[in-house]
Each structure stands twice: as structure tokens, then as C-alpha cells.
Amino acid sequence: MASFTPRDPDTAALLSRRDAVKTLGLGALFSLGLWPGALRAAGTPPPAGKFTFIAINDTHYLSPECGPWLEKVTGLIAPEKPDFVLHIGDVCDKGLKAQHLAVRDIFARLQVPMYPVIGNHDWTTQTDRSAYEEVFPNRINYTFEHAGWQFVGLDSSEGLRWHDTKIGDATFAWLDANLPKLDRQRPLVLFTHFPLIDGPSLRPITDKTNARMQPANANALLERFRDFNLQAVFNGHFHGYKEATFGAATITTNRCCALKRFNFDGTKEKGFFVCTAADGRVTRRFVEVKAEGSEG
């Protein structure tokens, strides 16, 4: 196998994708982090400027007491001056229209767009997600663009099921139809409720079974993005912080931001990410939301 030692950090950008594959082979490229999407983007200037957005997950609105809690959350979000909010699913707890409306209306006071994806708790029954779709139309599988960046929100749920699930055929069919429309060089952010992190099963620390919170076909979904300039993946569902990489992208799950739910990894902190997109990269900063009467 041919070896490749960059002369400086920018050397990789000078090697064409075709020459790199020919010289190194795909296996060596992957081991160096020089995946097809990263190579295709090399040499392409990143979008100018920077912007801030919020990534929040698992707010689990259940009852009226959750309203003041989420008002406190949005009170902490507002000073960050985000351009928009990504809601990574489980907007509410029982999938009821009134619950979805309550969350939508509280976040609307920020006067910036909120882009949700559906979580298992956003279904009313195993086969009925009509309340979510009525309150958040066209927010099952979709894309949007902002300041030269591409964002893709996907349905990773299987009704109400919370473990040992599969991402549905409809999501993969949507990808087949829509990924060709995206720019493979421009930076891209993917967000789904269920974790796309490979490796050991994620499960609540109190669970003694072999439950797995990642979908069985999570890797198959990620593979669809291998040839894109994927920079960040945001997931929820696990109610805890985990981090992994896929090419140039950092994949994270985050703690929940719910009044009446707990973290499955045993941690106490609840909150959200403040994210900054700049120079073609995304950074995250966790902001904790403390319950009334908590210390610190």
C-alpha cells in the first residue's frame, strides 16, 4: 500500500479526489479521514461569515407545568441570538395536538424558525402521527438552506417504539429522490431523533435487557452521506451525551431538556447546544438549564 504523509495541513486539499483514490485506495483514505465527501470539498472555499443556531432535543412537554420550564429554556436561548432552532425530536410526551401546539407557541416567541424532526413520543399511537404533521407540516423528511449551508432533517422513528427499531423505507426512498439535488461540496448538517452512533448499544443505565436505542440500519443511513461534505450530525433519544465521528463529521447525542424526564446515562444536567457554523465547521457549547431550587 502506498503511503501518504502530508507536507503540511493543507496538502490534502491539493490532492485531487481521483488521484487520492488511485494512489491510496479507499481503505487508506478512510483511515486518514480523507473520505470522498471531504476530498470533493477540499479546495472549495467555505461559506463566508458565521451564524449561530440552537440544537435541542427531548423537551417532552407533558402537562401545563412544562410551560414555565420551556419559557425558562427559551429565556436562555434568546440572548444567544440564534438564526434558528433545530428540535431533534420528542417535542412532547404523548403526541397530542395540544402538547405540540404548546411547544410550538413557546418557541415561536423567539421569532426565529424552529425546524423539528419527529421522535417516537411525537406519535399519538403506533400508526398515528397526524397531530405532529398538523402542527408541524412538511417536517417529516426535508431540507433547508441557510447562509450557504445545507440542513437535512429525517424521520428515524418507528411509531412509538423506543428500542430495537429500524428507520423506515419511506425515509430511504426520500433520500434516493432528494440527495441527488444537494450540493456535495457545500457543508451539510444532518439531524435525526434516533442516534446514528455506531458501536456498543445505547440503553438506559437502569435497563437490564439487551435493548438498543440505535436503529438497526443507522449505519446504512449514514452511508448515504459518505460522499457529501457532512460536518455535523445531531441526535437525541438517548438523553445523555455521546460523541462519535463519521468522516469529517462529529455525531452527538445530548442530554434531554425536559422538566419531567431524566437522563438515561444517569447524569443530572439538562440543557441544549449553542452551535456556531464558521469556516465550514460546526462547534457546540452546552448550556445547562437548572430547575428551580437547584444549586449552582
Image: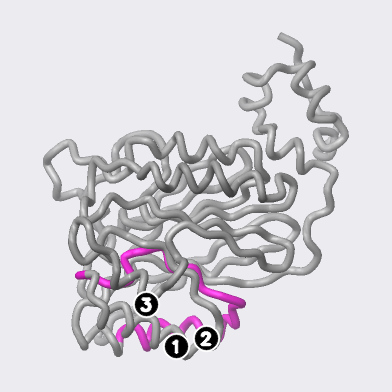
Question: In the drawing, what numbered circle is on residue 118?
Answer: none
Q: Provide residue 17's location: percent of width, then percent of height.
A: 79, 29
Image-based side of 121 in relation to 240, left or right: left
Q: Residue at x 43, y 47 (%)?
A: 171
Q: Provide residue 286's location: percent of width, then percent of height.
A: 47, 67
Residue span colored magenta: 69-94
Count up the numbered dots: 3
Q: Residue at x 53, y 41 (%)?
A: 245
Image-based side of 47 in relation to 72, left or right: right
Amino acid type at mark 1: Gly
Determine crowd level at label 2: few under 14, some 14-19, many 20+ residues with C-alpha closer than 10 A. some
Q: Are marks 1 and 2 in contact (CB under 8 Å)?
A: yes
Amino acid type at mark 3: Val
> Quadrant of residue 74 in the image?
bottom left
Q: Is residue 4 above or below residue 218?
A: above
> Quadrant of residue 144 in the image?
bottom right
- Secondary structure category for the residue under label 3: helix
Q: Provide residue 292's location: percent of width, then percent of height.
A: 27, 86
Does the magenta portion include 138? no
The residue wearing badge 1 is 75
Does the magenta portion include 77? yes
Work out which quarter of the rendered image holds the N terminus and state it. top right
Earlier in the chain: of badge 2 and badge 3, it is: 2
Q: Residue at x 18, y 62 (%)?
A: 125
Disc number lying in front (1 or 3): 3
Q: Tell me the CA gap for discs 1 and 3.
A: 23 Å
The residue wearing badge 3 is 135
Q: Tell me the CA gap for discs 1 and 2.
A: 5 Å
Image-based side of 197 in relation to 182, left or right: left
The residue wearing badge 2 is 78
